[in-house]
Image: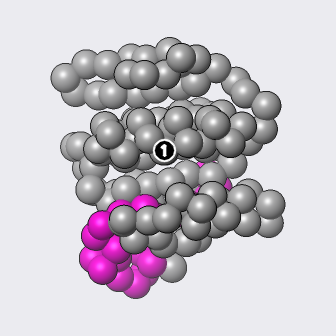
């Protein structure tokens, strides 16, 4: 991990990273690709967000329930689970149901109703960084 301000917990089964609290809002990045997760984390930290991240669905649910982030970015292809299952679990839990979830995935065509209705936004990969930032800010500010 390249996080200058992070605490990492890594094993063969999981990769969960949490940055030190930063000024601003918290975003949970759920992404199976180490490179994309790292780039998104660095980008968002550079914009002043506090970021927690994982590559595993079960960890994403636990982190969201414990930390209550302002928004979640969620890939559909995850280690050990399907992002659609994470989406359903978060939206069906009263504690996390109101957290906006943005699907960021190369597999957005696989997202059909009713799952598409659960997502607050859908961004297909590859994506424009400015587009991601604008959409996240819009969801956080609503």
Q: Position of residue 76 (x, y in %)?
A: 32, 60
138 above or below 17?
A: below
Camera-side residue: 11 or 41?
Answer: 41
Which image quarter: residue 100?
Answer: bottom right
Q: Which residues are magenta?
A: 96-116
Q: Is residue 65 left or right of residue 137?
A: left
32 above or below 6?
A: below
Which image quarter: residue 47?
Answer: top right
Q: Position of residue 82 (x, y in %)?
A: 27, 56
* Quarter of the image that includes the C terminus: bottom right
Q: Is residue 112 left or right of residue 121?
A: left
Query: Does the stretch in magenta take in 102?
Result: yes
Query: Does the stretch in magenta take in 90?
Result: no
Colour pattern: one colour
Mark 1: secondary structure: helix
Dot 1: within a 10 Å radius of its alpha carbon, few (fewer than 14), some, or many (20 or more) residues?
some
21 above or below 89?
A: above
* Quarter of the image that includes the N terminus: top left
Residue to which mark 1 is pinned: 40
Q: Is residue 79 left or right of residue 99?
A: left
Residue at 60%, 42% in the rendered image: 44
Q: Is residue 85 visible?
A: no
Residue at 60%, 62% in the rendered image: 130
Q: Is residue 29 visible?
A: yes
Camera-side residue: 56 or 123?
Answer: 123
Residue at 56%, 42% in the rendered image: 43
Direction bottom: furthest residue:
113
């Amino acid at each position: 991990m390249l996080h200058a301000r992070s605490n990492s917990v890594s094993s063969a089964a999981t990769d969960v990273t949490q940055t030190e609290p930063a000024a601003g809002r918290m975003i949970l990045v759920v992404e199976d690709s180490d490179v994309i997760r790292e780039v998104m984390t660095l980008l968002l930290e550079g914009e002043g967000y506090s970021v927690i991240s994982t590559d595993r669905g079960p960890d994403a649910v636990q982190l969201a329930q414990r930390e209550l982030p302002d928004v979640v970015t969620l890939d559909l292809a995850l280690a050990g689970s399907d992002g659609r299952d994470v989406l359903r679990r978060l939206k069906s839990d009263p504690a996390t149901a109101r957290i906006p979830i943005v699907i960021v995935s190369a597999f957005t065509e696989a997202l059909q109703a009713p799952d598409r209705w659960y997502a607050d936004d859908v961004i297909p990969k590859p994506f424009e960084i400015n587009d991601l930032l604008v959409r996240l800010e819009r969801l956080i500010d609503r």
